[in-house]
Image (cartoon, helix red, strand yellow):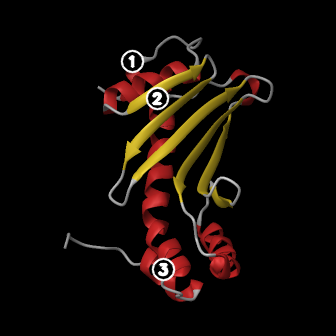
């Protein structure tokens, strides 16, 4: 049965769908408020903090996926150059660095204007895409920040498809 088959009622709250998905995947989560949920999703490189929030004002389901990163100050210009290059490759969502919180952030907003309803499959894909993008570019961000690799060289790691496991 597809995830979307569980939701036949169009009046279901998007965060209720996210909560059901979190339970389905056995992710740790906390329903922060009626319109917000926070989860921990395990990746290969690290555990990602994912928050989804529903804004009825602009009918947008917002996703924020974060992971800690505290690069040395001298690496910041190259890291920002790398972020720009990464965002050129990301069609859905974008990365930014929140220096005050020392967090790398992937953001995406699903606009559901006009009373549209997100399916469980759409939301599951949205969460998966955030984790996949974070996993894909995490090594490049690390190489830029701590190994002193130029962004172009570091991004070659992210672009290459890995086969198998070491």
Q: Is residue 155 visible?
A: no
Decide which of tag 3 and tag 2 comes sooner along the chain: 2
Q: Secondary structure at mark 2?
A: helix
Between the C-alphas of marks 2 and 1, the distance is: 8 Å
How far is disc 3 from disc 2 in space, using C-alphas?
35 Å
Which residue is painted at 65% across and 52% down in the image?
101
Left or right: 107 with respect to 139? right
| Percent x, y of residue 131 | 45, 52
Residue where numbered disc 3 is placed: 143
Mark 3 or 2: in front is 3
* Sequence-wise first label, 3 or 1: 1
Of the image marks 2 and 1, the number of the one nearer the N terminus: 1
**Residue 100 position (above or below residue 49):** below
Number of labelled discs? 3
Give the answer, above or below, for where 23 lies relative to 148: above
- The disc at residue 82 is none
Q: Are marks 3 and 2 in contact (CB under 8 Å)?
A: no
Identify the residue under disc 1.
6
**Where is residue 21 shown, x and y percent of the image?**
40, 28
Q: CA distance from mark 3 to mark 1?
A: 43 Å
Depth check, front residue: 95 or 7: 95
Q: Closer to the camera: disc 3 or disc 1?
A: 3
Q: Dot 1, crowdedness within 10 Å: few (<14), some or many (≥20)?
A: few
Return the residue at label 2: 120
Which quadrant is the C terminus positioned in? bottom left
Residue 39 appears at what percent x and percent y? Answer: 46, 35
Label 3 secondary element: helix
Q: Residue at x 62, y 58 (%)?
A: 102
Is disc 1 placed on a helix, strand or loop?
Answer: helix
Q: Quadrant of the N terminus?
A: top left
Residue 66 visible from this viewpoint = yes
């Amino acid at each position: 049965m597809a995830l979307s088959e569980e939701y036949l009622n169009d009046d279901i709250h998007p965060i209720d769908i996210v909560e059901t998905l979190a339970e389905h995947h056995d992710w740790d989560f906390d329903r922060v408020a009626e319109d917000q949920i926070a989860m921990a999703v395990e990746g290969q490189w690290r555990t990602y903090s994912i928050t989804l929030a529903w804004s009825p004002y602009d009918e947008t389901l917002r996703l924020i996926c974060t992971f800690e990163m505290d690069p040395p100050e001298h690496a910041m210009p190259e890291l920002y150059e790398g972020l720009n290059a990464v965002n050129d490759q990301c069609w859905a969502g974008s990365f930014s660095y929140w220096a005050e919180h020392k967090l790398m952030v992937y953001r995406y907003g699903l606009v559901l204007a006009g009373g549209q309803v997100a399916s469980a499959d759409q939301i599951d894909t949205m969460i998966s895409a955030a984790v996949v993008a974070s996993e894909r570019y995490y090594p490049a961000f690390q190489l830029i920040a701590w190994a002193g690799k130029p962004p172009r060289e570091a991004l070659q790691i992210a672009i290459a498809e890995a086969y198998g496991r070491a």
